[in-house]
Image: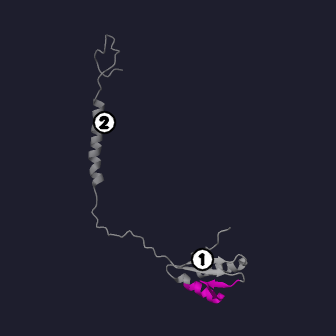
């Protein structure tokens, strides 16, 4: 399979061809040039828009935190003040309506019956409190 005709190092013609056939390379380059000529105007086409400016600083409104403590005898403390169960549910309802809704942290005594903690959690759920967490002390 010879690409050209001629005598390559002898009468048998089995020598190494020392020149490169540039025609396929030029053909590929012309095809790439045509592709770029067609695609560049499509890429650079843009629509002029007058977009609004926005400030990218985050608005960090930290909601207040309400701490509810349940003592060993089942008494409920709202931020260190003792409250009755009826007043507790009223306060939870008003807390649930606030925007942004404050976080509720429950602190329970180690020896309190789980029933009292479950009642506090159920009251918070009925009132519509979404951010509820438990406060614990690290073990020693």
Q: Tag 2, which secondary structure?
A: helix
Q: Which residues are magenta?
A: 74-94
Q: CA distance from mark 1 to mark 2?
A: 71 Å
Residue 12 location in percent, x, y?
A: 34, 11
Q: Answer few, some or many: residues within 10 Å of disc 2's Cα (few below 14, many 20 plus, some between 14 and 19).
A: few
- Specify the quadrant of the image occupied by residue 14: top left
Which numbered circle lies on residue 16? none
Q: Please tell me how crowded label 1 is: few (under 14), some (14-19), or many (20+) other residues with Cα within 10 Å.
A: some
- Label 1: which residue? 105
Residue 57 vs residue 35: left or right? right
Q: Mark 2 highlights which residue?
A: 28
**Residue 11 image offset from top left, x and y in percent:** 31, 10
In the image, residue 27 lies at what x, y percent? 28, 34
The image quadrant where one finds the C terminus is bottom right
Indicate the quadrant where residue 3 lies. Answer: top left
Front of the two marks 1 and 2: 1
103 or 2: nearer the viewer = 103
Secondary structure beneath label 1: strand
Front one among 85 and 83: 83
Residue 93 lies in the magenta stretch: yes
Q: Nearer the viewer, residue 13 or 122?
A: 122
113 above or below 57?
Answer: below
């Amino acid at each position: 399979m010879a690409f050209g005709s001629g005598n390559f190092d002898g009468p048998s013609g089995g020598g190494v061809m020392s020149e490169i056939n540039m025609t396929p390379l030029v053909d590929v380059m012309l095809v790439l040039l045509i592709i770029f000529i067609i695609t560049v105007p499509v890429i650079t086409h843009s629509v002029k828009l007058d977009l609004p400016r926005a400030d990218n600083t985050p608005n960090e409104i930290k909601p207040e935190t309400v701490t509810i403590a349940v003592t060993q005898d089942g008494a409920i403390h709202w931020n260190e003040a003792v409250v009755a169960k009826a007043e507790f549910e009223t306060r939870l309802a008003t807390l649930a309506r606030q925007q942004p809704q404050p976080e509720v942290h429950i602190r329970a005594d180690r020896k309190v019956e789980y029933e009292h903690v479950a009642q506090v959690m159920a009251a918070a759920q009925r009132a519509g409190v979404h951010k509820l967490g438990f406060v614990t002390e690290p073990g020693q």
